[in-house]
Amino acid sequence: AAGSTILRSSEPVTADATCVSRLRAAGFVFMGRTNMTEFAYSGVGVNPHYGTPKSVWDRAQGRIPGGSSSGAAVSVSDGMDYMGLGTDTGGSCRVPAAFNGITGYKSSTGRVPRDGVFPLSDTLDTVGPLANSVQCCSIIDAMMAGDRTGNVLARDPATLRFGILQHVAMDTMDPEVATAFDAAIKTLGKAGVVFSEVAFPDLTELPALNAKGGISAAEAMNVHAEMLERHGDEYHQMVRTRILSGLNVTGPELVEHYRRRKEMISKFERLCSGLDGFILPTVPILPPLISEVEKDDRYGPLNFLCLRNTFLGNFLDSCAISVPMTARGEAPAGAMLMRRHGQDTELFNAAASVETILQKALS
C-alpha cells in the first residue's frame, strides 16, 4: 500500500518484486510490511493514516523515526527483525538508519532491479537495506543485485583517504551532531585515516534547483497525476503538496536540471580521484519531536534538513552508506560515506573499517 490508504483497494499483486524474490530464494523469511511515509515522499517519517513509529531515542517525548523507511529502521533497531528493505530517492534508507542507530545503504542506481517497486522518481530511486552492520547490508545488497559476493574485506585504516565537503554538507548542524562528527574524525585520524577538505561550490546551487521540487517532484507528479485527480483528498496533504509542486517545473527547467546534474556528477567523479570517498554527517540535526514536525510551518524546513546531506548522494549518483557515530542510548547521529557510482564493493570495504574503528571507540 506504500503507506497510503488509496492503494489498499487495488488488486493484490501476484508475484514478489525481484529484489524480494531473490532474498526469499536465499532463505530470508519476510515477516510483514513495516510502516512508512506515504508514497515514500518525505524524510521525516510521519504517517497520519497508520500512525508514526517513534525513534528508539527519547521515546517518552516521541521523536521522528526519519523517512521514508521509518518502520523498517525502528523494527531493526528494536530487534524485531534482522533487516528491513526500503527505497532511497533522497535519503530514505540512510536518514531513518541515522535516527535509529543502525546502518542504512543506498546502492548505485540500476544495480538492484526495481520491478515490483512502487516508483517515486525513475531517475533517483534505488532499493536498499537497513540492518545492524556494514556486513549485513553488504550481504543483503549483493543478494538483491546479484552482481557481487557480499564478502567484505575491511581496509587497513592507514590506506584510507576521505574528503570532507566544504560546501552544503557542513553547514548548519545541531551542536550534538557537530560534536559527534568531530569526535569521529579525530578517532579515525588516530587510527591512520587521512582526511582532506574539498571545495565543491556547485552544490550551493541545489536549493535553487530544487526550489520548485526539482527532478523528484516532476517525476513523482508524472506517477501520481491520475490518482491525485481521483483521490487527492485521501493523500497526506503535506505529501500531496510536495507532489503537486512538480506541476511548477516547466519542461525547459527540467531539461536544465538533468543537464546540470550530469555536469555535477562528472565534477564529483573527478573530485573522487585519489580518495576512497567522502565522509559527512548523514543528517545535520537530531530527530525532532513528532509534534514539531506535524506543524504546517515546520514540516517543510525540517524535512529539508533531514534530507539535505543524503540527497547529495542521490543527485550525484553515488553509492552511500550511513553508520552510527554515537553509542546506543545516546542522541543518534550517523556518519555517511559516499563513493562514485558503481563502486559499491569498494565502499563496503572502506565502511567496514570505519565501522570497526568507531564501534571500538564508542564501546
Image (cartoon, rainbow, N blue to C red):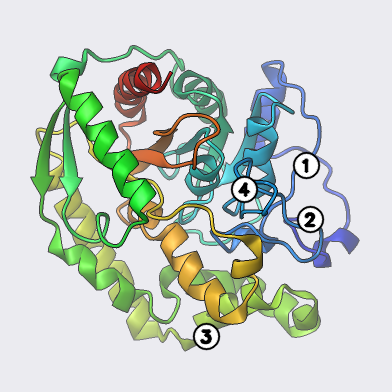
Q: Label 4 amino acid? A: Ser
Alpha-carbon distance for marks 2 and 4?
13 Å
The answer to whether residue 339 is seen in the rendering is no
In the image, what residue occupies the spot 33% across and 55% down? 312
At label 3, which amino acid type do we have? Leu
Label 1 – label 3 distance at C-alpha? 31 Å
Reading the chain from its start, which is encountered first: label 2 or label 4?
2
- Depth check: give the residue in front, 3 or 17: 3
Residue designated by label 1:
33
- State which tag comes first along the sequence, 1 or 3: 1
- Observer-nearest residue: 231 or 197? 197
The picture places residue 88, in percent across and down from the top left corner, at 51, 49
- Badge 2 amino acid: Ala
Asked whether the beta carbons under mark 2 and mark 1 sit within 8 Å of each other, the answer is yes
Dot 2 or dot 3: first in sequence order is 2
Residue beneath label 2, please? Answer: 1
User: Which mark, by number, is residue 247?
Assistant: 3
